[in-house]
Amino acid sequence: MITHMALATYASVVTTEWLRPTENGGQRCWWPGDDDQYIEYHDTEWGRPVADDTRLFEKLCLEGFQAGLSWLTILRKRENFRTAFHAFDMDEVARFSERDINRLLEDAGIVRHRGKIEATINNAGRALDLIDETGSLSEYIWNFAPDLPFGRDGESTHASGVASISPSATALSKDLKKRGWKFVGPTTVYSFMQSMGLVNDHVNGCHVRGACEVARQSSIAAQNY
């Protein structure tokens, strides 16, 4: 089953097989299907640039929890994750103790995986270190955004013309790992880059593709200013 994690760069021709009609007569990417929550996520969040440090940290953590699962599973639990991890406040999460880990392992509203929970706590500390070094998580992450049309620097073997990894995602993943981050493999990082708007992987013809690209280019220009 294809989830948003499997999306990436596009070939020159994308057929209507990868588009679905919207309720207003337009078209959107195929992957949300008919799920209302997934459609809302696609239309209002996915691929729209994010520069807020807390939201970027949250998404990196949730992408780690998503590994081996579908993103829809995580999306449906996202509010539970936000409650359990204190709105992904990095200072608070970095101070989580073994007692907190045990609390989270008993929380049926999240994915109860000790390794992923411990990675989130570890990554909070690494994020704070990175902010001390670079000024903000956003500034650091957006330095890896490809300054190319739609951010497409990967190659695709999928019939839709989209890929699951790219050189920029591999570079970010490698640097994060060097800094001590966990559960940040290149495929996970690429999915993160798609969702946070560093890459615009909406299918050609999708009703939000143009707006997402204008916003992405503006974010890159602001980063380079």
Image (tube, rainbow, N blue to C red):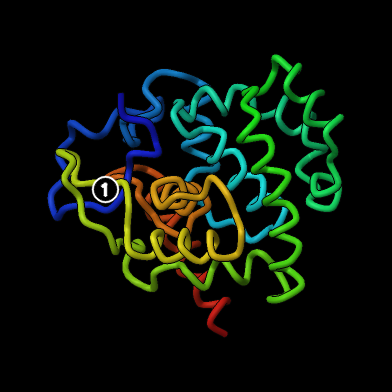
Give the quarter of the image for residue 108: top right
**Residue sitting at 45 percent across and 67 percent down?**
145
Residue type at numbered disc 1? Ala
Q: Residue 28 appears at what percent x and percent y?
A: 35, 36
Closer to the camera in the image, 218 or 155: 155
Q: Which residue is mark 1?
A: 163
**Residue sitting at 29 percent across and 64 percent down?**
153
Tally the numbered discs.
Answer: 1
Q: What is the quadrant of the C terminus in the image?
A: bottom right
Give the quarter of the image for residue 84: top right
Q: Residue 169 appears at what percent x and percent y?
A: 41, 59
**Residue sitting at 46 percent across and 63 percent down?**
174
Closer to the camera in the image, 41 or 138: 138
In the displayed image of the protein, which residue is found farthest to the front? 98
Closer to the camera in the image, 148 or 143: 143
In the displayed structure, 23 sits above or below 128; it is above
Secondary structure of the residue carrying numbered label 1: loop
In the displayed image of the protein, which residue is found farthest to the bottom? 225
Q: Residue 93 appears at what percent x and percent y?
A: 80, 44
Q: What is the quadrant of the N terminus in the image?
A: top left
Q: Residue 59 appears at what percent x and percent y?
A: 60, 45
**Residue sitting at 76 percent across and 16 percent down?**
106
Q: Residues within 10 Å of mark 1 (few under 14, many from 20)?
A: many
